[in-house]
Amino acid sequence: MTRPITAGVDGSEESLAALAWAAREAVRRGLALRVVHAWRFQPHDAIDAGDPDTQAQWVREGLVEAARTVTERHPALDVTTDVLDGGPVETLVAAAADAEMLVLGSRGHGAVVGFLLGSVGQQVIAEAKSPVVLVRAGDQASAEAAGREIVVGQQGDAEDSAAALRFAFETAAARGATVRAVRAWTLPPLFAYSPASLKLLDEAGGLEPYEKKALGEALRPWRERFPDVRVVEHVEMGSAGQVLLSVAGRTQLMVVGRRAHRTAVGARIGSVAHGMLHHADCPVAVVPHD
């Protein structure tokens, strides 16, 4: 069964930008769009907030009105709306489990500050089993114009980045865009050198050729699966966050991975994903992997 793209909407400008982004992506991929709002009755002493039935009706009407903005623009798009009873984190995580991806809005105030990611957004990204895309208020379809790339961070071995690479290639194929696969590297500490590692580096011809070979091997299955997608291999010395941000200005979408397993202190986003979410001025997709 084909899963929809799900957009979380709360009436804010950034969530409406996320809804518009999700609708365009659903059209490209030939998928349905599910629009959800997480809601729980909250009485208010200072103002007349209505009873539970009245509040629920207001929420449903707002959600239907938000959905109408995309059905008018994309009349052939299959759109459903759901008011989900519960707290935002648990309901959005559950919605993501049944979706191809979850798309949320994130407040941003310019290219320098970037995303202002609240605790709800961080928890949803850390817990979700499907990719989560964060979209800033003011995002426009024009940002997806030809010439702007899908940038994906690749690190570790081929298995470590397979989920992020798959998402990037699928997105690029749907848009006719170029994938820029970025692998950043730094000099290892002296104690990390061993006879086995030195042998591998010697066979590769040095550190940078070794990193280029690792990137090429990780990309090979995706090049074969998506032969029409143009690929730029980008290997650069530096921290992953710095290198990715250096190319973010010409990016339609930034794709980064995060480990899906929980640690002793709970689920975490990861430093690279965290940096992209707070500083990249384009939509960012965070893709979980084992």
Image: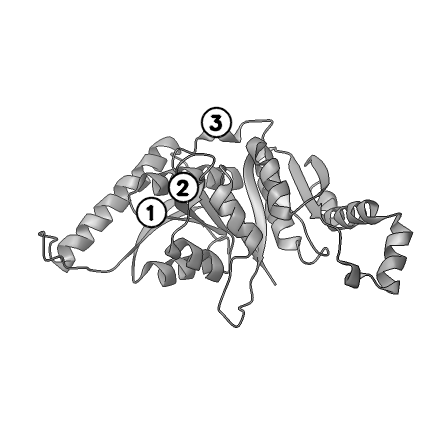
Q: Are marks 1 and 3 in contact (CB under 8 Å)?
A: no
Q: Inspect the image, locate mark 3, and give the three-letter code of the amino acid beneath it.
A: Ser
Q: Inspect the image, locate mark 1, and give the three-letter code of the amino acid beneath it.
A: Val
Q: Quadrant of the C terminus?
A: bottom right
- Residue assigned mark 2: 18
Q: Are marks 2 and 3 in contact (CB under 8 Å)?
A: no
Q: Residues within 10 Å of mark 2 (few under 14, many from 20)?
A: many
Q: Inspect the image, locate mark 2, and give the three-letter code of the amino acid beneath it.
A: Ala
Gap between marks 1 and 3 measured at Cα: 22 Å
Q: Earlier in the sequence, mark 1 or mark 3?
A: 1
- Residue assigned mark 3: 142
Q: Earlier in the sequence, mark 2 or mark 1?
A: 1
Q: Earlier in the sequence, mark 2 or mark 3?
A: 2
Q: In screen coordinates, is 11 left or right of 103?
A: left
Secondary structure at numbered mark 1: loop
Q: Is residue 26 in view from this perspective? A: yes
The location of residue 260, given as percent across then percent down, is 55, 63
Secondary structure at numbered mark 2: helix
Q: Are marks 2 and 1 in contact (CB under 8 Å)?
A: yes
Q: Residue at x 72, y 49 (%)?
A: 186
The location of residue 216, given as percent across then percent down, is 77, 46
- Residue assigned mark 1: 9
The location of residue 123, given as percent across then percent down, is 43, 59
Q: In screen coordinates, is 90 left or right of 212?
A: left
* Location of residue 28 with respect to 240 vertically, above or below: above
Q: Residue at x 78, y 48 (%)?
A: 211
Q: Is residue 98 in view from this perspective? A: no
Q: Quadrant of residue 23?
A: top left
Q: Residue at x 37, y 63 (%)?
A: 90
Gap between marks 2 and 1 measured at Cα: 8 Å
Q: Residues within 10 Å of mark 1 (few under 14, many from 20)?
A: many
